Amino acid sequence: MLTRLEVLDLAVISAAELEFDPGFSVLTGETGAGKSLLVDALGLVLGDRGSAALVRTDAKRASVSAEFDVPADSTVGAILAARELPEEEPLTLHRQIGADGRSRAWVNGVPVPITVLRELGEALVEIHGQHEHLALARGDQQRQLFDGWAGCGSEALATQQAAHAVGNAHNALATARDSSQGREARIEFLRFQLQELDTLSPREGEYDALFAQYEQLRHREQIAEALGVALDALEDGEGTALAALARAHEALSHLPGAAGLGETADMLAQAETLVSEAAQTLQRIGDSEDDPQQLDALNERIARYQAIARKHGIEARTLHEQRDRFAAELDTIDNSAERLETLEKHFNAAIDTWKKAARALAKKRQAAAPRFARAVTEAIRALGMPHAEFAVALAPTPDGDYPATGSESIRFEVTTNKGQALRPIAQVASGGELSRLALAIEVLAHGGTGTPVMVFDEVDAGISGRVAELVGGQLKALAANVQVLCVTHLPQVGALADQHFEVSKKEARGVSVTEVTRLEKEQRVEAIAAMLGGVRVGDTAREHARELIERERPDL
């Protein structure tokens, strides 16, 4: 349950602190005093969207804190454990919105994303706003309320997941079918290109090697001339390097060891050996005979490389990669018939899975629909519509569709007058009737949600008199199982409260300020009397207020 709510610098609220008890609590006050703003504050600390416009004028930030008592084995505990957040009593949620619009959040003192507040909020509190009854006319809202009451959560989720799988399988199959168009023409093209490339048989690195060999042969005369010059310098000519090294080594080798030139003589001997080996290598290269056709063959293969590469718009050295790409694509296309068959099997299997899930969901819905209709009919008759009838219409979806919501649409139908046919609720119910209908359905549907706190923000709008007492009785009955907070203008509802907060607006230093006061005993009588009697509260109104309160709460 919600035990404490603290609000600072939020719009017209400078500071407000409310401590809540179990049961049924009401917030009353004049229009514009800030009652619904307190509901908005609770929504903010539960992850609703915030903005800088909510920050009180001249304040740096607005902040809202809420404390909850929650069982250790609740959904909240599982969320905290999954997020590795500390489990403390009470659970404390905190939200700040800066004047610059930036928002920050904490759970038990630990900074968290706003999404964590939202996740916890869905497990803690269910808020029904002033105009939420209008949403009851929407098909998606009707489906969610009904499925929640009927306990169809697991079946609905399975159907949704199966529909998603059907969509994915259909897209994959459609893509494969589209790609198979023009298959034969593409196969013929690929085979022709591969035949040409396989005739060449390009290999990685071959083109660069061919080009290097071609360049060497093309410059053969220049190379031969250079070899001759080098050999003359090293060995064949007069005053060659080899002869000079031999003379130098000979001169030093006969010196006595005391001269200290033995190491130098060894170095000259090594140099003489190296020069001799280099000369022999150059001689072998010079003696090799050239193949006169080799240059032509190299030139022809290089030209074929370049011609095919130009045709494909790529570099000659990457032709082997193009050949591999064509071969891979041809292999894929050759296997496309088998792949299409596999995809069709997957698609049909996904449809079968959806049908199985949808049948289970439909079976549960069909069993629950008459029970839900009877329960809602009884509830709205108890709220002052004695001739009302309510029904849940289940209409099958068209064949060939696999919607995520199941194999049938759900529509709430009602008649409020005797002898009239059932029609969609948006076409029949007046504003007050729709409010009562929404309240009855929300109270019934709440049994499947498990949220420990329910907040109703002026859901009793448009009703009065005896019907107001009946609505208050419904809220009071609901408070036997969950904590209920209600913003109301109705004295009949306020008189039923276990605790009563009055919201008022005053001026402080020329600025409007909202204050919240918890009322006790005679204060409650005055507040209920004001709701009954208007601006001037007389003894008759006070007596009536006291009678209302004591009738419902004789202990006060």
Image (cartoon, rainbow, N blue to C red):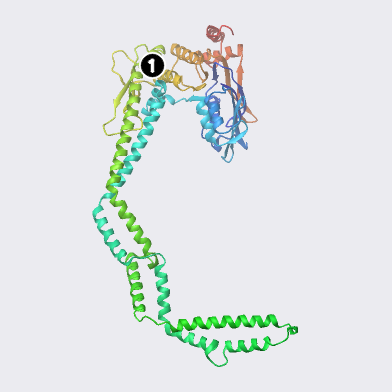
Q: Can residue 93 be seen in this view?
A: yes
Residue name at image x 52 percent, y 83 percent: 279
Residue 322, given in percent of the width and then of the height, sits at: 35, 61
Relative vertical location of residue 54 with respect to residue 531 in this rendering, above or below: below
Neighbours of disc 1 within 10 Å: few (<14), some (14-19), many (20+): many
Q: Can residue 37 be seen in this view?
A: no
> Is 480 displayed left or right of 379 in the figure?
right
Residue 155, given in percent of the width and then of the height, sits at: 38, 26
> In the displayed image of the protein, which residue is found farthest to the right?
258
Relative vertical location of residue 16 with respect to residue 281 in this rendering, above or below: above
Residue 398, given in percent of the width and then of the height, sits at: 27, 31
Q: In which quarter of the image is the N terminus?
A: top right
**On the image, which quarter does residue 470 sit in?**
top left
> Is 444 displayed left or right of 181 in the figure?
right
Residue name at image x 48 percent, y 15 percent: 478
- Along the line of sight, the residue nearer the viewer: 73 or 67: 73
Residue 50, given in percent of the width and then of the height, sits at: 53, 35
Relative vertical location of residue 381 with respect to residue 288 in this rendering, above or below: above
Q: How many marks?
A: 1
| Disc 1: which residue | 376
Q: Which amino acid does label 1 sit on?
A: Val
- Along the line of sight, the residue nearer the viewer: 479 or 194: 194
Q: Quadrant of the C terminus?
A: top right
Residue name at image x 58 percent, y 12 percent: 525
